[in-house]
Amino acid sequence: MKHLIEPVDLTPQEVDEILNLAEKIIADPPAYSQKCRGKKLATLFYEPSTRTRLSFEAAMLELGGSVLGFSSADSSSAMKGESVADTIRTVQCYADIVAMRHPKEGSAKVASLHASIPVINAGDGGHQHPTQTLTDLLTIRSLKGRLGQFTIGLCGDLTFGRTVHSLIRALMRYEGITFLLISPKELKIPDYIRADMQRKGLAFREAERLEEVIGELDVLYMTRVQRERFFNEEDYVRLRDSYILDGEKMELARQDMIVLHPLPRVNEIATEVDSDPRACYFKQVLYGKYVRMALILKMLGVEA
């Protein structure tokens, strides 16, 4: 595993190995507390982040390693016009592994082409977010007991939602999954992903009303309408409240359905849902730290 740019860079066997290792870490964190002693992670975040950046940093620190980097393009030489290629050539002189977030699609791939150390894509524009996908897979497997044989609803911004794009690409490789794609017509899944699903013969259908399909779901994956992906404020304001999950809608859902969200949320999940035992998005955050610990160990080739 030289680099991780999109979920399919990992074979299903490699995904299983990472998830299995994450579960071992969850069971015995002290056993892994010095595994990365002397190793350094560089976090290159050209775009705002809370969970992804902090979970990478917490993961490396809990493995006994150290962290350097920047949390905004404003605090890096990107403000002076430095290219991603030159930045990565510089950073590899200081670090052993890189986690990079960038607003432009394909930036992590560009970095990987010029890097002599492993590069992890921590989100590139509206394209892919593979470590969020590993988090989602670990959460689903831990809470539902399986990866496969379930119905998942992906709701909200499916056009620009990189977490949705990555998760669909990853779940395509598991048996018996039905996808319900829930969005306004302006925010439907991109054509290239729909074509992939059709080519692979996957079971999916599209819907515009969450309340009409929520009762069919084993997993509901909510997403926010992302202001930063829109070209004008008028379209964002018109679509931002398209879907709000509240207690009334939760009454229509199965008792064993789980609700996930990559966060941050704005208002697409009412706070009244937080107390529902089916609301698992903050558990999901914790799983993200452990899966990134496992990924760092694997990509650095550390004996675990």
Image: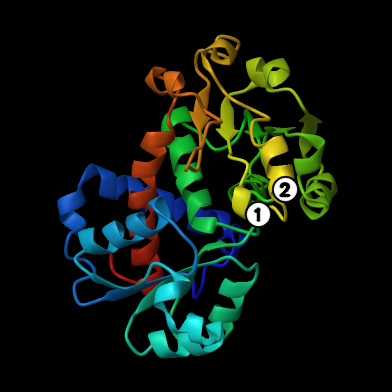
Label 1 secondary element = helix
In depth, the one of 157 and 267 nearer the eye is 267
In depth, the one of 165 and 34 nearer the eye is 165
User: Is there a contact, CB below 8 Å, between mark 1 and mark 2?
Assistant: yes
Q: CA distance from mark 1 to mark 2?
A: 10 Å
Question: Residue visible at 22% across and 69% down?
Answer: 65
In depth, the one of 72 and 187 nearer the eye is 72
Label 2 secondary element = loop
Judged left or right of residue 260, residue 167 is right
Q: Which numbered disc flags the more N-terminal residue, 1 or 2?
A: 2
Which amino acid, by three-letter code, is at mark 1?
Answer: Arg
Judged left or right of residue 197, residue 142 is left
**Coloured how?**
rainbow
Query: Whole-percent x and y of residue 2?
Result: 49, 76
Looking at the rendering, which quadrant does residue 31 occupy?
Answer: bottom left
The reply to whether residue 188 is in sight is no
The residue that mark 2 highlights is: 159
Disc nearest the viewer among 1 and 2: 1
Marks counted in the figure total 2
Question: Residue visible at 40% across and 19% down?
Answer: 277
In the rendered image of this protein, does residue 96 appear above or below residue 142?
Answer: below
In the rendered image of this protein, does residue 250 appear above or below residue 14?
Answer: above
Which amino acid, by three-letter code, is at mark 2?
Answer: Thr
The reply to whether residue 191 is in sight is yes
Query: Whole-percent x and y of residue 264?
Result: 47, 43
Looking at the rendering, which quadrant does residue 239 occupy?
Answer: top right
Question: Residue visible at 15% across and 53% down?
Answer: 30
Query: Whole-percent x and y of residue 230?
Result: 69, 52
Q: Determine which of the numbered discs, if any, sits on residue 229 in the image.
A: 1
Q: Residues within 10 Å of mark 2 (few under 14, many from 20)?
A: many
Q: Determine which of the numbered discs, if any, sits on residue 254 in the image.
A: none
